[in-house]
Amino acid sequence: MSRIPQAFIDELIARADIVDVVGSRVTLKKAGRDYKGLCPFHDEKTPSFWVVPSKGFVHCFGCGAHETAIGFLMRYDNLSFREAVEALAEIVGVPMPAVADDDGPRVDDGLIPLLHEADQLYRRLLRETPKAIEYLKQRGIDGPTAARFGLGYAPDAWDTVRHGLGRDERRMNKLIEAGLLIRNEQGRVYDRFRDRIMFPIRNVKGDVIGFGGRVLGSGEPKYLNSPESPVFHKGRELYGLYELRRNPGRPAEIIVVEGYLDVASLAQFGIETAVATLGTSATADHLRRLTRLSDRIVFCFDGDRAGRAAAWRALETVLPFAGGNVEIKFLLLPEGEDPDSLVRARGADGFRALLDGAAQLSTFLLDELAARADVTGVDGRSRLIALARPLLDRLPAGFYKELLIEELARLAKIESARFTALLEGPKHGPEHTARPAEARRRRGGTTLIGKTITLLLHYPAAASLAEPVPGLDDVDEPGAPLLRRLLELAREHPDLRPASLIERFRGDPDEKHVRRLAAASPPPVDDDAAAARELKDSLERIVRDHAEKVRKRSTADALRRIRAGADFGKF
């Protein structure tokens, strides 16, 4: 199977004139800043089909069609995704990139040799820098482990790579494209990585495609990763996967951890099947790769609040893969521990003992829901159903889903048939907004999270303009995981057009939710700056509302305990 680089798809959508693409097939008339015509996907006499060039998508208020230029070509010309991309590339006048097998190397474009040179430079500088060697010794990393993972060091200077590798303007531009150098608005070029232990990230063939840098001191960010490039895609690559695949045979299990040092430390203690995500949450692409390599995937997270939040996000990602031949488990480490510290304290046998006790996906899901919803009262049972509904929507149909519904019904103390009926009843969460044709009329009934997602889908640049809001990771309301995912994606790619953001969800379990919410009318803002202010205000309200709900639940729980104690005293 071949894969078209996401960067090419983003560029293609940005360059395409959707009015020209659609107008060559549908008669359009100017209507203010947009265009309208008769929808080609259903019979109608009054135009309800709109083309929005500023956003790069089309929308029909009659049948609910909501498509990018690629999606429009797929539906109108009956094309596959690849055929539609090729057709749009021909319209725009850009050549299709060379693609390799799904597990093969990315488009090189001359970046791989430069990244190899940088890797060799960082390795040499580590050998020549006593303080970097001492840091690794203090962290317990020995020489063979450092050599196995190719660790290096980026000095505390602004021009190490620029002077060492940027010998001419062409190479300088390539180093910028690879993410090793940065050119600021004033035109100054400087090194991205400074005073950091460097972890080379390799594809399955061993080519260095990016780096992760861990700061030696107390600076921020603690970890800094290469930006995406034609050869490096964070949502698909995994640190340590190349080293894992060098071991003979099929691994009995793969352990997914959060840090590069976790991977290296576990390998040093003989646990050689750990990989780490690259500063992002686990993605569907990660799961597809891992489930091809092993029949058991164990997500291992720190035992603090951030670790539990990361585990919950991973749970939401893996649900479409549940119930098959692959066993998916979760391990939350004791408070204050991470894989690095724990394996050093308890040894390989102690760590493996914890792995053996990792919770099955279904057990982890039920335990987490039970912790988030007090099912002793009506309010808690209703909350359990509200939390469970979007999760169950992500599960594939079959026995696994039916058995899980039975367990949830038992947890909620409701008959299974009644529980199923409640799940299939009216849905009010942001993932279940009104049909696109009704979205504008029913906007007032959409939740705050749903409205915020719609704002973000129409104004993705607002995510990088708005300051981060503390506490958002703790919000466990329906729709919050999708909101966090969109924020992360939009901040990672501040130049994405709305259509490009929507297109990135093609084939994703959240695609239907994204399309529904993108079809709703956004708040009346004039530009990205106004959207950023609206976004920050909405995020703060979401956090405040959630905190108030938690406070009220805690108060209610305390009152129930007091009443229970008073009743007991009567006897």
Image (cartoon, grey):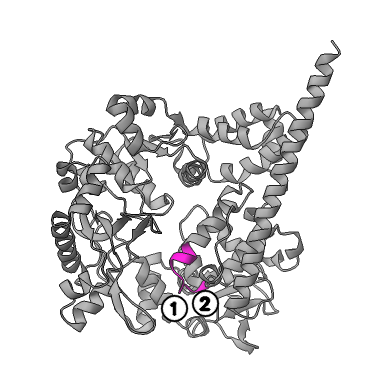
Looking at the rendered structure, the kind of residue marked 1 is: Ala
Query: Tag 1, which secondary structure?
Result: helix
Indicate whether 277 appears above or below 334.
Answer: below
Residue 519 in sight in this render: no
Residue sitting nearer the eye, 164 or 97: 164
Question: Could you tell me which residue is drawn at 28 percent across and 42 percent down?
Answer: 139
Question: Could you tell me which residue is drawn at 72 percent across and 68 percent down?
Answer: 440
* Residue 246 in picture, x, y percent from top left: 17, 43
Identify residue for label 2.
56
Label 1 with label 2: CB-CB less than 8 Å: yes
In the displayed structure, does residue 305 sit left or right of residue 84?
right
Residue sitting nearer the eye, 478 or 564: 564
Looking at the rendering, the stretch of residues picked out in magenta corresponds to 489-498
* Residue 547 in picture, x, y percent from top left: 68, 48
Identify residue for label 1.
14
Return the disc, 1 or 2, that comes first in the chain's sequence.
Answer: 1
Quadrant that contains the C terminus: top right
In the displayed structure, does residue 148 sit left or right of residue 516?
left
Distance from Cα at disc 1 to Cα at disc 2: 8 Å
Asked if the magenta segment contains residue 87, the reply would be: no
